[in-house]
Image (cartoon, grey):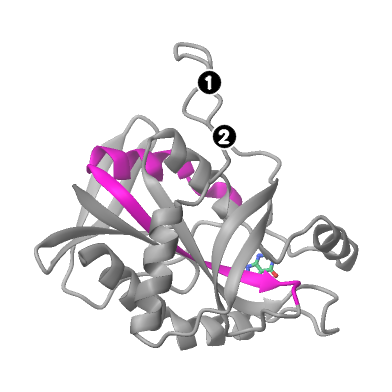
């Protein structure tokens, strides 16, 4: 079986030697890099495209996840840039996502539409694979990469950032971090029976938490600081 890494904002390729290929799925075509590391084939997929041309609400999540399934991937580790509304998680910190709250509005969320497919209600007790989560924590520890904790991810539709009132509400509901892409990615992985875990890199305080508005350069700086550490740990998890 192959393994996969999905790169979110700021993570558009891996350092290792790579070859770009394209696969056609029933939902559209998907480009990915493929590399062999220590005898293990790893597929790398840039969620927003290699030049970040796709905003979160325009990503073809079903094509991406179907492509990984067709490539015989059984384990996926994904990065995601997130804002923090939890005082314990500051910009530059790394968190493991343990659950989500979905506030997306207009995205196909399933491979089972009920037309010519059966009706399926996928189970969500453990949306993020606990085995991959604990292996990531273990390897990060061995590589001396500081992981701040586990976080509940609120997924918004975007592409706009949230209002301060929305963030107050999400916080009251139990959210720790906010992003725009983990739903439906994690849901579709589960429907296809692939183990999926996501690691958040905190890029900013959410709107209204620290007073300042969210700046693009803040997001770029935090990602640049952490992306190599996180992807190194991902490769380590998937090849051991
Ligand atoms: N909100 C939503 N998505 C994000 C944020 C945020 O503050 N930061 C990075 N992705």
Q: Which residue is mark 2?
A: 108
* Residue 121: % across, % down: 56, 25
Identify the residue at image location x=77%, y=58%: 174
Please tell me whether residue 221 belongs to the stretch shown in magenta.
no
Is 199 situated left or right of 103 in this image? left
* Residue 203: % across, % down: 61, 78
Using the rendered view, name the quadrant where residue 70 is placed.
top left
Ligand 1, what quadrant? bottom right
Return the disc, 1 or 2, that comes first in the chain's sequence: 2
Q: CA distance from mark 1 to mark 2?
A: 9 Å
Q: Which residues are magenta?
A: 57-86
Which residue of the protein is positioned furthest toward the left in this rendering? 39
Q: Are marks 1 and 2 in contact (CB under 8 Å)?
A: yes
* Residue 103: % across, % down: 72, 47
The secondary structure type at the circle numbered 2 is loop
Label 2, ligand 1: CB separation under 8 Å: no
Say few, some or many: other residues with alpha carbon within 10 Å of mark 1 (under 14 / 14 to 19 / 20 or more): few
Q: Which residue is mark 1?
A: 113
């Amino acid at each position: 079986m192959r393994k996969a890494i999905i790169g979110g904002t700021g993570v558009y390729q891996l350092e290792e030697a790579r070859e770009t290929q394209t696969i056609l799925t029933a939902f559209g075509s998907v480009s990915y890099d493929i590399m062999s590391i220590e005898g293990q084939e790893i597929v790398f997929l840039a969620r927003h495209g290699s030049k970040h041309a796709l905003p979160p609400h325009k990503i073809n999540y079903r094509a991406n996840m179907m492509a990984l399934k067709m490539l015989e991937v059984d384990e996926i580790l994904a990065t995601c840039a997130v804002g923090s509304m939890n005082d314990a998680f500051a910009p530059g910190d790394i968190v493991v996502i343990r659950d989500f709250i979905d506030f997306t509005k207009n995205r196909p969320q399933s491979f089972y539409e009920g037309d010519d497919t059966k009706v399926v209600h996928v189970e969500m007790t453990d949306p993020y694979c606990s085995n991959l989560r604990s292996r990531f924590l273990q390897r990060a520890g061995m590589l001396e990469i500081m992981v701040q904790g586990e976080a509940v991810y609120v997924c918004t539709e975007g592409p706009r950032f949230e209002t301060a009132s929305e963030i107050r509400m999400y916080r009251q509901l139990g959210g720790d971090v906010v992003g725009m892409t983990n739903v439906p990615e994690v849901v579709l992985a589960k429907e296809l029976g692939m183990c999926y875990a996501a690691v958040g890199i905190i890029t900013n305080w959410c709107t209204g938490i620290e007073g300042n508005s969210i700046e693009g350069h803040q997001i770029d700086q935090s990602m640049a600081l952490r992306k190599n550490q996180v992807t190194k740990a991902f490769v380590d998890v998937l090849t051991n």
